[in-house]
Amino acid sequence: MTDAATLLDACRAVGEDEAARAAIVAALVAYERHPERRFTNVRDEVTGPIADALHAGCGTLRKTLANGLVFEFLYSSKIARDFVLSTPAVPDHVWEPQTTRLLIHLAAQGGDAIVGGAYFGDQAIPLAHALGGRGLCHCFEPDGAQAEMLARNASLNGLENLRVDRRALWNEAGATLRFVGADAYGRTVPSEEGIPTTSIDAYAEEQGIARIGLIMLDLEGSEHAVLQGGEAALRRDGPPIVFEIHRSYVDWTEGLERTEIARFLAGLGYALFAVRDFQSNYDMAGRPIELVPIATAVTDGPPHGFNVLAVRHPSMVEDPIFRVVPGVSPKLLLHRDPKLHHPTGGL
């Protein structure tokens, strides 16, 4: 009888052959898409673990989007896993399709963008590409390996408007933080030594930024502190903000609108909407970006997170690209109640 370790070693050996690996990935995707399995949790329970074993020894991978943007990345997170297992094989995004579309839409306003927790560029690279000559994309990524990958991806795509800063964003400049956790789930906490910090306001003054047109934060719980460090910019420029909120770090038992970060932003004149999205790579081309007024968002279930859009002028969401849908969950999930967890109109 073959033991688990031998089987994992065998998968790893096969995965080192690029053609064999691609054939198995295609078979896994076809297995998922079978009508009997499409609306199940098959990715986490079956195909995902096989893909993980297959890619255990692969090192740096490369994949191209439909618009020609090229990404190199390490197979070290669910982001990488779902990008590898994308349908179609050449997708239009890396991770969280509606968030990518939202950022690209907001980039049309121009101005410089601030990205906190830029990782290898899953959102920052499409954002910088969309900004083009209208502004710079200032990316903060204190994880050295991911910062190098981000810089590499900017170079591969000729994005001269993308800047990489290895400091951590915080509510003040000159402090130090340390990592808790690793990779995509790593968060920073105060420490006597470690990663140096800057704030949005300090950085904007340091760089002479005339106008911040957009802020995007995915910081595993540090979003409120970072926005506090950008209060002057928020008051002056009123940029749209896209940020993650997660039950593991934010207590929303009294309602999302009563959380500290929501009250802070409301005090600055912002209206908040939860962004309905898959935390995966899932084809949403041609569908509106669905937004849930946060006071009506359904947040039942185990600890989870989702992205929020904060806008100074609610008229911004009257654009045809958006659809406001109260009373549903922001979490799009194939295997959960379609009335709450599928986009309106079905999948």
Image: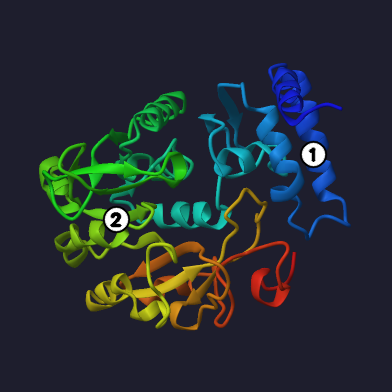
Please give the label number shown on residue 213: 2
Tell which tag, 2 or 1, sits nearer the viewer. Answer: 1
Measured from the top left, where is residue 255 in percent x and y?
A: 42, 81
Q: CA distance from mark 2 to mark 1?
A: 41 Å
Q: Earlier in the sequence, mark 2 or mark 1?
A: 1
Q: Taking 235 as reference, is 344 left or right?
A: right
Quarter residue 286 falls in: bottom right
- Which amino acid lies under the numbered mark 2 shown in the image of this protein? Gly
Residue 140 position (above or below residue 323):
above
Is any part of residue 252 visible from this angle? yes
Question: Residue at the spot x=57%, y=82% of the render?
Answer: 327
Q: Nearer the viewer, residue 179 or 243?
A: 179
Measured from the top left, where is residue 155 in percent x and y?
A: 41, 24
Quarter residue 300 falls in: bottom right
Reading the image, the residue beneath label 1 is 28
Could you tell me which quadrant the N terminus lies in?
top right
- Badge 2 crowding class, 10 Å Cα cut-off, few under 14, some 14 to 19, many 20 or more, is many
- Badge 1 crowding class, 10 Å Cα cut-off, few under 14, some 14 to 19, many 20 or more, is some
Question: Residue at the spot x=57%, y=38% of the render?
Answer: 80
Q: Taking 81 as reference, is 296 left or right?
A: left
Quarter residue 273 falls in: bottom left
Measured from the top left, where is residue 67 in percent x and y?
A: 58, 38
Q: Taking 86 as reference, is 209 left or right?
A: left
